[in-house]
Every structure is written in C-alpha cells, then in structure tokens.
Amino acid sequence: MYILGPEVDAFEAAFARYVGPEHAVGVASGTDAITLALRALGIGPGDAVATVSHTAVATVAAIRACGARPVWVDIDPATYVMDLDDLERRVGAEPVRAVVAVHLYGNMVPPGPLLEICRRHGLRLIEDCAQAHGASWDGRSAGGFGDAAAFSFYPTKNLGALGDGGMVVTGDAEVAARARRLRQYGWRERFVSAEEGFNTRLDPLQAAVLGVLLGRLEARNEARRAAAAAYDAALAGVADLGLPGTSPGVRHVYHQYVVRHPRRDELAAFLASHGIGTAIHYPVPVHRQPAYAGRFPPEDLPATEAVSGEILSLPMFPQLGAERARHVATLIRRFSSAAA
C-alpha cells in the first residue's frame, strides 16, 4: 500500500488513457522517466543520442546516466524546439541511435516530420514531455508518437504533484515490461534481479493527488491558453519584442510564456521594480555548463546561443487571467516606449 500498490496502478491506467498509448509506468521523477525510457529501448554506453542544448539539464543528465552521449541539435528560434532540418543534417553525419525530442514550454516538436526523419534513419524516438501535458498535434497527445515518452510531475508542471514524480508511457508491451523491471532493481521476481536496475517508484500518495488533478488538467490548460491569447493581443507590435511561436498543427499548452528582447535583463529589472516576477528558462545552454563544457563539443548552434541571452518567461499559471496578463503587457509597453 505504501510502495506502488493500487493508487499507482489506477493513476497509471488513467494517464495511459489520457495520453493514448497502452502502457504507463510510474517512477520517482521526470529525469528517471527519460533514463528508464532510454534504457528500456536498449540505449546504453557509447551510444549517441540527438537532443537539444536549450532544455532543462535533466534531459542531458538522463542521457548521461545511461552512459550515452549527446549529439547537439539546434533549435528553431521562433518556436524554441528542435530544428528538424538541423536534426536531419546531424544524424546523417554520424551514427546516432536515438532522439530525445524535447517538447518545450508547452509547445511540441512537430511529430509528423520528426517521425519521418526517425524512420528514415532507423532512430528510436523518446519524447521528453515534461512541459507538454495535454499538448497535441493533429488531435493526438504529446507522448503518443514515440517509441516511449517521459513525463515529469514536478509541482510546477501543468500536471504537478505535491512532490516529485514521473511516468514512462509507451505502446510497446516489451518496453513497458522492461521499464517496470528497471524501476525496481531489475527484478523479474521479488528479490531476484535479472539485470541492473534502479529504485525509482512513483509514491502512491503522489499518484492519488495526480489522479484527482488529471481530471482538472484540460480546464487548467484552457486557462493558460486564454492568458496566452491575452498576452498575444496586448503585446502585438511592441518594438523589439519577440512573442512565442507555435509549431504547425500543435495545440500549445503554455507551460511557460517566453518572449525575446535584446535588453532582456533591463526588462526583467523593470518588471521586478513593479512587482512582476519573471524567470529565464534557460540562461546557459547545457553544452556550455561546467559539467558538460568541452566534453561534448557541438558544431555551431547559432539559434541556441542567440536565444539564451534574450529569452524571458513572463508570469504564466492557470489563475493568471486576462486582466493580469494585460497589466504585465502594459508595463512592457511602458518599458518599450521609454527605451525608444
């Protein structure tokens, strides 16, 4: 009852129905979900995995936890997600076994073209859906396209627990069975490990909370979209301000509302002086962080480098509402006018 048990079973079943694939495996964090998805698909030491550097470091930490190495792919500067033309070029230039496609800020890497590239090059596809609960493309949910997908239930996510948690989702019964073994020491039977595994189990108290909140996710995502629409309308035409783009065919769920401005730090300070909190997701690309710098040198990543100095996450949460979004926009317009 306290470790796994019926609450976890019930939430796994409900979440699988919500996303689409048949199987869901609850784990202790989103990072562990990526790690187990990779391991369950046979990705291990020495394998090359294509992903982006403009992401939470967890994406790359999970790749490294498998003993694999990242192959950096640039991003689309308008949508902030993986540039598929650049992916095609890079996987054609060296042997890559898998792609971790990061659906960032509530937007998605367009699954149709992404799947075509993966099939053409024989790549396993793992969707990193930590920021895309409820996002969809062509009516299908994020997490329903790859060989496996990883979700995080960190408290700030669109579907967040009262602690940590994660989920591996897959339509492949063998991948699901291996992920279930790996999350509990590699046990094929109790106390007997068939392979080296982990201790990474979704807590049943968190599963119970998430089971309730899953029923509220669509309404909360609609509230985020309404706030984003208010921002879009109120910020249209502001000089030097880049608004967030959406990949073609994607239903964005605005985990973050991320703008670009060449005087980002000054804008953030101005908003702070008026009581408006902001954040930067993410100020340093992973390939330039001390833990990774020089170890996996990338080719040029011009869009990744450019956005890191200009992006700013404005307030975004289901209770924000249009009025407060317009208030933030009014302050940004005031900043822009003063700077003109």
Image (cartoon, helix red, strand yellow):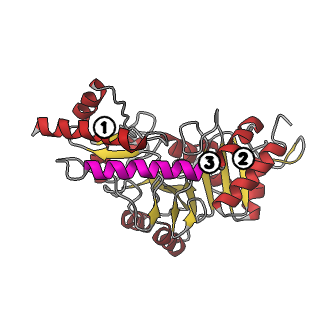
| SS of the residue under disc 3 | loop
Q: Amino acid at mark 2?
A: Gly
Tell me if 10 is positioned left or right of 278 in this view.
Answer: right
Amino acid carrying label 1: it is: His
What distance separates the C-alpha of mark 1 from that of mark 3?
A: 27 Å
Left/right of residue 167 with respect to residue 51 in the rendered view: right
* Residue 293 or residue 36, whichever sits in front: 36
- Residue underneath mark 1: 327
Magenta stretch containing residue 118, yes or no? no
Extreme left residue here?
Answer: 340
Question: Which stretch appears magenta?
Answer: 217-235
Image x and y of residue 79, in percent: 36, 56
**Residue 83 image position (x, y, % from top left):** 38, 61
**Residue under the point 84% across and 45% down:** 6
Q: Quarter-wise, where is residue 2 in the image?
A: top right
Q: Could you give the CA–CA distance between mark 2 and mark 3, rounded to whole angstroms?
A: 20 Å
